[in-house]
Image (spheres, rainbow, N blue to C red):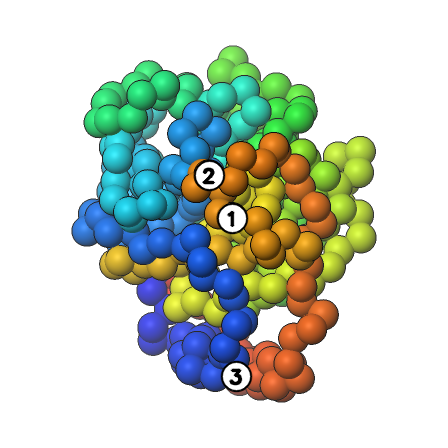
Amino acid sequence: MRSLRTTPVAALAAVLLAAAPAGAADEDGGFTIEDPRITESSGLAASRAHPGVYWTHNDQDGPYVYAVDSRTGRTVATVTMRGVGKPRDMEAVSVGGDGHVYVGDIGDNLNGSWPNVWIYRFREPERLGDRTVDATQYTVRYADGPRNAEAMMVHPRTGRVYIASKNEEGGGLYEGPARLTTGGTNVFRRVGEVPWVTDGAFSPDGSQLLLRGYFSARAYAWRDGRLGADTAVRAPIQGQSESVTYTTDGSALMFGTEGGRSEVVRVPVAGQEDRPPAGRGSGAPDAAPAPGGGEGRDHTWTVLLLAGVAVVAMGGRKLRRRS
């Protein structure tokens, strides 16, 4: 994703960042990505094998995935994927219940012109450290034609992969086959309507799907593989809101952004504010209470967001971006 610094959306983001009320997001347990190589952190996923570690990646620097320790912000592993083609625009990462890391090369540089995109999959290493791993490549196309996307989520119970397309006027939620195959093209079919989405994540128990955009986030009840009722979720305003994941115990959401030394902000799930950060001695089992906390938002936020809609309508309808 290209920087938004020169767009009206970026101008609005700057206003919101300056005007954000104290306490808009609980940053205890958040961290800064220190690795100078990571300048386009487009996806974020909590490691299942290594508590407190998060997987991330750049858009286009090659078949690399980085493991970052949230205690220090330092990279503790660089994984090079072998057996895949040159990534075109990697935008999402998710760790499945099968112990594998899934990487979504799903961005579309021409906003819906690529006939197919790809998903890469490799087993999460038992030990952290730089290594090259054999990865499986899956070819993906959408039943209703090409489109741009930045959100890919693997359901922790069923293992089914979902992709949310990105469109400022609203996108679609696409469901992959029950099992991905290397023997042909995996067709993803539209099963729901979603807002402007830059990333998403399932709760650890699979009961919620969290989708974030540039200025907001919503949690959807997940029932029988379909979107249910949704609620607003308290989310930080960041310079370029690109990623989100749950902590492995479901007690908090981790929101990320692009840029050098980008910050990952921890926001407790409603009702879980007193629990310590996951991977830091909490000892809590995996759970996923419904996210929330948006209903107490100050009225000023409503005014600012409405102003943002006006700004976008006047001058920022089409973002100039790589994906």
Residue under numbered circle 2: 281
Front label number (3 vs 2) = 2
Mark 1 touching mark 2, by CB under 8 A?
A: yes
Q: Nearer the viewer, residue 204 or 142?
A: 204
Residue linked to disc 3 = 311
Residue 66 lies, in percent from the top left, at 30, 37
Task: Give the x, y percent position of residue 153.
Answer: 57, 38
- Amino acid type, mark 1: Pro
Q: Residue at x 36, y 19 (%)?
A: 126
Circle 3: residue type: Val
Circle 1 is placed at which residue position? Answer: 276
Where 44 sits versus 10, above or below? above
* Of the image marks 1 and 2, the number of the one nearer the N terminus: 1
| Left or right side of 85 for 161 | right
Of pointers 3 and 1, the one earlier in the residue sequence: 1
Place of residue 221 in the rendered image (x, y in percent of width and height, measured from the top left): 76, 46
Residue 156 image-quadrant placement: top right
Count neighbours of disc 1 (C-alpha within 10 A) and say few if under 14, some if 14 to 19, many if 20 or more: some
Question: Observer-nearest residue: 60 or 300?
Answer: 300
Q: CA distance from mark 3 to mark 2?
A: 44 Å
Element type at mark 2: loop
